[in-house]
Image: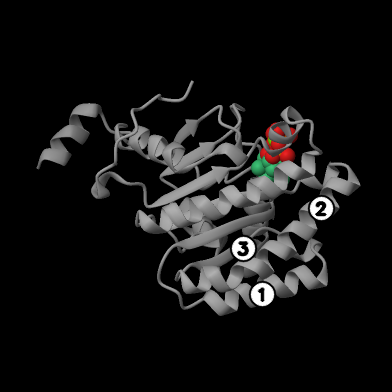
Amino acid sequence: MSDDAPVVLTPPDKMPRHVAIVMDGNGRWAQRRLLPRTAGHREGAKAVRRIVQACGERGIEVLTLFAFSSENWNRPRREVDVLMNLFVTTLRGEIRRLDQANVRLRFIGDLRAFSATLQEYIAKAQRRTAANTGLTMVIAANYGGRWDIAQAARRVAEAVVAGKLQSEQISPELLHDFMSLSDLPEPDLFIRTAGELRISNFLLWQLAYTELYFTDRLWPDFDVSDLEAACAAFAGRQRRFGLTGEQVARRDHA
Ligand code: IPE
Ligand code: IPE
Ligand code: MG
């Protein structure tokens, strides 16, 4: 299913600049061990720590992690509560280490749905790390790709109503500027764990030309060698952006 690329170190110039991950399979990881699903989320948080460090070490510029989708509110109340608590405790426990590691933390999604405490931690964490120059770690929380497009459309409409923009000026490039992550390089590599072959309302707009990589590995088991394998698969792909393979090869050898 995945590209089964041998685990070799990817040369720096072939590394993705921006990796976006749907961290899936926490529940199944726990169920296989006859543990409550929430134990899988706790173990998943450890995998986040591992992968953030590995991305920083490899010079990856942006890591976007899908932590909680707009649809995840529909899970059993207890599971949602545990996830919310885990966000707070992980943020509190990790922020100093992330800051020291020069990580810049960002959140995308409709954060207003979260408790005041969590919103405060999020704001504090973003402020504290805003000037850091290492890995930009983006947490997508209460995020949905359709929400993102809708909030961009709403803000464009507001600008038109306010007379700051003519409707004829609306183009893909303009809308892009209103989307989440528009100030960062577009995702080069999308990874989804746990064998599910879907996007689940993650970055719909931003994934237009992203290379997709799927692995059966469950998120709590995802380790540095899995990241290497994904990067090696990415490095072996030819990104054509609508051109012919020959055009791309000629350009690359020019
Ligand atoms: C992903 O793991 C974590 C979140 C969605 C928060 P899941 O909890 O979806 O794990 P599975 O898919 O049930 O195994
Ligand atoms: C996507 O995983 C959301 C996150 C990883 C946060 P889900 O497990 O919620 O996706 P579906 O429901 O299987 O599509
Ligand atoms: Mg899942």
Horizontally, is 173 left or right of 39 in the view?
left
SS state under label 1: helix
Residue at 65% of width from left, 62% of height from top? 157
Residue at 54% of width from left, 39% of height from top? 222
Residue 185 visible: no
Residue at 27% of width from left, 44% of height from top? 14
Q: Which residue is mark 2?
A: 82
Residue 123 marker: 1
Residue at 82% of width from left, 67% of height from top? 115
Q: Is 253 in front, or is 205?
A: 253
Residue ranking furthest to the right:
77
First in residue order: circle 3 vs circle 2 = 2
Residue 176 visible: yes
Q: Residues within 10 Å of mark 3 (few under 14, many from 20)?
A: many
Where does residue 91 sit, x and y in percent of width and height? 66, 66
Q: Is 57 in front, or is 238?
A: 57
Three-letter residue code for mark 1: Ala
Q: Label 3 CB, ligand 2: below 8 Å?
A: no
Q: Mark 3 and mark 1: span between their CA atoms?
A: 9 Å
Q: Residues within 10 Å of mark 2 (few under 14, many from 20)?
A: some
Horizontally, is 208 left or right of 116 in the view?
left
Where does residue 38 sit, x and y in percent of width and height? 78, 44
Q: In the picture, residue 211 is in which quadrant?
A: top left
Q: Mark 3 and mark 2: span between their CA atoms?
A: 19 Å
Where does residue 177 sit, x and y in percent of width and height? 50, 61
Residue 107 marker: 3
